[in-house]
Image: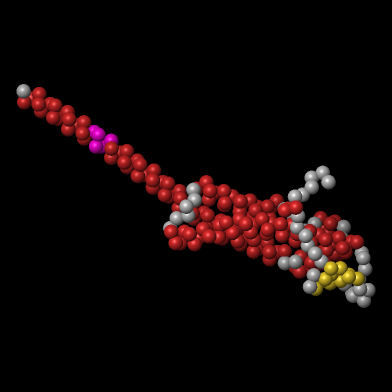
Amino acid sequence: MIRPLDEQDIETEQFHFEYDRDTERPRIFNDIVTLRSGDHIIELTLSHAIAQSSKLSRFESRISPILISVTKLPKRLALYGTLGLKREQLLKKSGKLFKLRVDVNLSSTILDTPEFFWSFEPSLHPLYVAMREYLEIDQRVQVLNDRCKVFLEFFDICVDSVAERNMARVTWWFILVILFGVIFSLTEIFVRYVIIHRHTST
């Protein structure tokens, strides 16, 4: 292999296959696929859906540690009113979730119907769709997107809150600088007044 995958990047889908000449069409139940014959085109059709499910499983396993790391943040915010994280840390966590969402919806082929069914075997498209439905691919993608969306919205609120606190801090610094400037100017005016008053008195 030119570019072998790491073990952590490998997902396995296990199904049992059996052949029954009495069955009218391919069917699947309890992860047992029953085929009329060993037609490699039909097996390829099922393999497309299984491959997409395996790829989606990889994304699901990638999101789990990310969600575990951020699940405690809303509770911490509710209890203490602060996350204890810097803006850069929040943006990194948000970026990981957003990248995963982009990978699932735009960069991968999970949502795409393979060209095979449009160009060569359109009659097998219903079988491919049935296998996708059995594997609940669309529902799993929706769940993954919904989870990402919830936490991305939460991160947006947190980032805005941090930005507001930073802006408030900067505003207070400006106020303090102006206040010191006014005090310094008043002190200078008072000193000059005292000096002029002494010269006038003498």
Could you say where residue 44 lies in the image, as x and y percent from the top left? 86, 60
* As drawn, 42 above or below 23: above
The reply to whether residue 38 is visible in this rendering is yes
Name the chief secondary structure element in magenta: helix
Magenta residues, as a range? 181-185
* As drawn, 29 above or below 116: below
The reply to whether residue 49 is visible in this rendering is no
Location of residue 18 by image quarter: bottom right
Viewer-nearest residue: 140 or 125:
140
Q: Does 33 appear in magenta?
A: no
Viewer-nearest residue: 123 or 15:
15
Q: Does 184 appear in magenta?
A: yes
* As drawn, 200 above or below 65: above
Looking at the image, which residue is at 17% across and 32% down?
A: 190
Could you say where residue 120 lies in the image, as x and y percent from the top left? 87, 57
Looking at the image, which residue is at 59% across and 50% down?
A: 95
Q: Residue furthest front?
A: 7
Where, quadrant-wise, is the C terminus in this rendering?
top left
